[in-house]
Image (spheres, grey):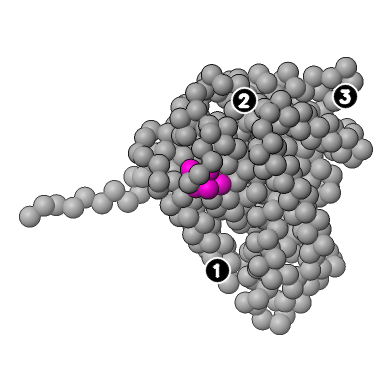
Amino acid sequence: MATVVSLEGKRKAPTLDPLLALCADSMVQVDREIRVRMRSPVSLIPELATHLVGAGGKRLRPLLTVSAARLCGHPSTDERAIKLATCVEFIHSATLLHDDVVDVSALRRGKPTANSVWGDKASVLVGDFLFTRAFELMVEVGSLDILGVLSRASSTIAEGEVLQLTSQRDISTPEATYLEVIKAKTAKLFAAAAEVGAMVAGRNGPERVALESFGMNLGIAFQLVDDALDYSGREAQLGKTVGDDFREGKITLPVILAFLRGRASEREFWKRTIETLDQQAGDLERAQALIDRHGALADTFERARHYGAMARDALGLFPDSALKAALLEAVDFAIDRAH
């Protein structure tokens, strides 16, 4: 009889390293293009932009663009994919600058936010500069279809920001509205980043649809995990202050679920702390305890796994390859950041 040896506990944690390694040459070009496009005779612009964009990070969204293009057979030597990836990063960075002003955030990627260093006005205006640079890059690529995808994504992101603002501190916000917000604010750019990768490779049929679906579902999973980590993660890992969402009265899925499942006294706690922002010492710890008691974190992660599975399924029509395997691992990385 064969002996079955359990590998439980020995599974290697998923990372972005394989995807980054396969696309390293393209990402070097993207970083170079970013530095060139941030130049301006107005010294504050590159100084502030470099503080955020130059901080690096994993550049997941532009990585999706170049890897999607490669998955569709696009040569890495074509500068159009590089320009599109740079465009995607600039759209993302512009929204971060604006987000941090709206949210009065103090940390981003473990560093002081631009608004906390240079002030709100400078951050908003440099965000606008990055948006204009993004549209210059779209025009240079020379495709009205691609311009349409990215401009619609930019519009949708702005709509998501406003929708989140209108639902902020409204503890009765339904889960459907929350999902609408994260689809618009986060997932739409993931979807567009992957979709234009297929488009620049000339794949406007099933591959384009599949990669748009891949990006959308990956983006939803990514944001669900982010929102859960705000109540469960460690500050050093997150690169931001744990509990920021709570302090700002943001309505995220862990809060929605804990509120719906709580007793009357618990609901009064959420109304006081979220709706009126009357927060006292120990309230964050109590919020974390209530979220844990009602299984809100576990269910948020479960929903993330559901969307992650749909992202993986979307790649099913592509033949097996090292690049496809790396993209599948990127889905696992987005979800397993919680551990």
Kind of element beneath mark 1: loop
In the current view of this chain or complex, which residue is farthest to the left? 1
- Three-letter amino acid code at the position of disc 3: Leu
Percent x, y of residue 312: 44, 49
Q: Which residue is mark 1?
A: 295
Residue 135 horizontal side relative to residue 258, left or right: right
Q: Which residue is mark 3?
A: 44
Above/below status of 229 relative to 109: below
**Residue 326: image location, x then y, percent:** 43, 37
Q: Which residue is mark 2?
A: 80
The type of residue carrying mark 2 is Arg
> Can residue 14 be spotted in the picture?
no
Most foreground residue, 69 or 282: 69
- The tag earlier along the polypeptide, 2 or 3, is 3
At mark 3, the secondary structure is helix
Residue in the image at 69% along x and 71% along y: 174
Seen from the viewer's position, the closer of residues 264 and 17 is 17
Find numbered disc 2 in the image and state the secondary structure of the residue it sits on: helix
